[in-house]
Image (tube, rainbow, N blue to C red):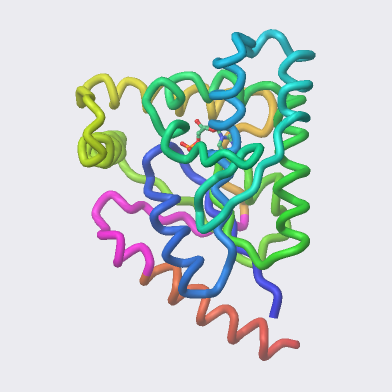
Amino acid sequence: MDISVAIDGPAGAGKSTIAKIIGEKFNLMYINTGAMYRAVTLKAMNANITEKNVDDLVKLVESLEMHFEEERLFVNNEDLTDMINMPIISNNVSKYATVAEIREILVKLQQNIAKKFNVIMDGRDIGTVVLKDATFKFYLTASNDQRARRRYDELLSKAIDVDYDTILNDIIKRDYIDTHREVNPLTKAKDAIEIDSSALSINGVVETISTYINSNTKNIQHSL
Ligand code: DC
């Protein structure tokens, strides 16, 4: 049976960790759409193109071939996964992600991947725009403090020097931009299941999602 899973939610809610595990469990290709916006940000910053220079941004994005290999993002055959997760990219990506022309190109690319493969995609507009007809939609949240704490621990474990308050403020700022932009803002799809992971372990969230998919997949199969 063809299935697709959409996972949306704010920064640091645990979307990518959960999506990777669920992807393996249910044999779905994991597509991290945030990585695509991050790659555009990295390339644009390297080329000194600001988010206001839309013509040059569009030319730049059209020159990028993006694909995933085992959850790593390759852009024009270069693995950018580590670079795009640096704090400088996190702090600038929301600005570039507000540009409608860029979103249009990336959304099409994401939809084309989903036409070819059974996917689990995480991002901000997956259940509302990219995969409006996804078989399953989840909206993952957690308290600001939990999300900042997780990002802080993750960066420390990669030996990236960070300060907790800076991370917390960056997350709050990024959420504001992501939820208030004009085009495809972050919002819960009406038919998405909301999961607050503040008090749940990774296993707890995986269990909740897996149970939901398993019981509803049976229902879908029965009704065929
Ligand atoms: O998931 P992430 O933190 O890596 O996403 C980085 C940024 O990209 C996020 O702040 C907003 C943007 N984004 C988006 O606008 N739409 C998506 N589908 C995914 C990410």
Q: Is residue 24 left or right of residue 6?
A: left
Residue 120 location in percent, x, y? Answer: 58, 60
**Quarter of image, res 174:** top left
Q: Is residue 17 above or below residue 157?
A: below
Check the image and name the residue furthest to the front.
77
| Residue at x 62% of width, y 42% of height | 77
Residue at 67% from the left image edge and 23% from the top image edge: 182
Residue 212 on image: x %, y %: 48, 73
The N terminus lies in quadrant = bottom right
Quadrant of the rendered structure where residue 119 is?
A: bottom right
Q: Is residue 10 shown left or right of residue 217?
A: left
89 over 52 or under it: above or below: below
Q: How many marks?
A: 0
Rendered position, 217 above or below 124: below
- Position of 69 with respect to 62 (left or right) is left
Q: Which stretch is magenta?
A: 191-206
Above or below 205: residue 210: below
Can you say which quadrant of the picture contains the C terminus? Answer: bottom right
Q: Is residue 203 magenta?
A: yes
Please name the residue shown 59% across and 86% down the image. Answer: 218
Q: Nearer the viewer, residue 120 or 56?
A: 56
Residue 222 located within the stretch drawn in magenta = no
Q: 221 left or right of 12?
A: right
Where is residue 65 shown, x and y percent of the image? Answer: 71, 39
- Of residue 10 and residue 192, the one placed in the foreground of this image is 10
Which residue shows up at 38% across the image and 49% down it? Answer: 14
Residue 68 % position (x, y) = 59, 51
